[in-house]
Image (cartoon, rainbow, N blue to C red):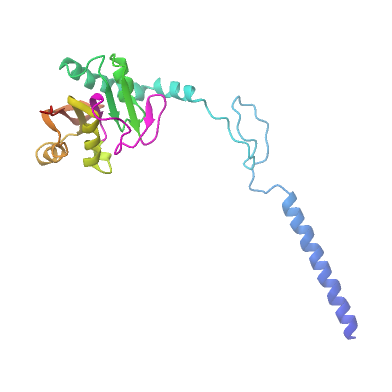
Amino acid sequence: MEKHIESLLKRISWGSITIATLTLMSMIIQTPETCIPETPNTSMTKFPRSSCDSNHRRHLPIDKKNHRLWTSKAWNQQVQSYVQLFGELQNRRLLANHSKVLCVSAGAGHEVMALNRIGVSDVTGVEVIDSLPLVSRADPHNLPFFDGIFDLAFTAHLAEALFPSRFVEEMERTVRNGGSCVVVVERCGGEELDQILRLFRKSRLVNAVNVTFNGAQMTRILMRTKVSA
């Protein structure tokens, strides 16, 4: 009797194992229900055939990406704001076509393009993430340039600097004696303006004026680096 029961239990165990194995193989072979079934693609754009398709979309070449960006209305409006800003510096004879200009924390390069449009060709834009061909990668707190090689340094992103004093120190270091540092910040005055001016230890204030920049109320600060004795 005991041998009969033992034989029965073995048959049940082998049957369970067989069923489990077949179920597992079926789950592996069958397409998951969460995947979108393949459908004919009549679009000109190559999309993945299903949600389980491992093929990636073809990346747009950088020149086509830039063309799409640079021809947008938003891009050109912002570039035009910089054109007006730098045009005023040209009128004050602080910026010329032959000037060597450094744009610190230049983002996607609006200010670089604006300077090129008004005839300034020797422009270097730097940012922690490059946006070629207008902006190269560099740490604004540790600029990879020799002392005093630029005529003018510009930034519209001082407020976003992790270490503002170091940021300004690097701007001053790379600008020649008698050159200019130009900063655009949210409209300020009084104590706020004094705090910004105290960051410039090797420059003197030329003027600070309120301007409308890219549709916002801003303050443009112009500093002149001190000429060594």
Quarter residue 103 falls in = top left
Question: Where does the magenta region start and end?
Answer: 128-157
Q: Position of residue 170 (x, y in %)?
A: 25, 35
Nearest to the observer: residue 43 or residue 80: 80
Quarter residue 187 falls in = top left
Position of 194 with respect to 109 (left or right) is left
Nearest to the observer: residue 65 or residue 109: 109
Position of 208 with respect to 55 (left or right) is left
Nearest to the observer: residue 12 or residue 143: 143
Tell me which residue sits at (80%, 63%) in the image: 19
Q: Position of residue 128 (x, y in %)?
A: 36, 36
Q: Of helix, strand and loop, which mostly describes the magenta segment?
A: loop
Q: Name the quadrant of the N terminus.
A: bottom right
Is 38 part of what is drawn in magenta? no
Does residue 89 sit above or below 58 in this rendering?
A: above
Q: Position of residue 5 (x, y in %)?
A: 87, 81
Tell me which residue sits at (11%, 30%) in the image: 205
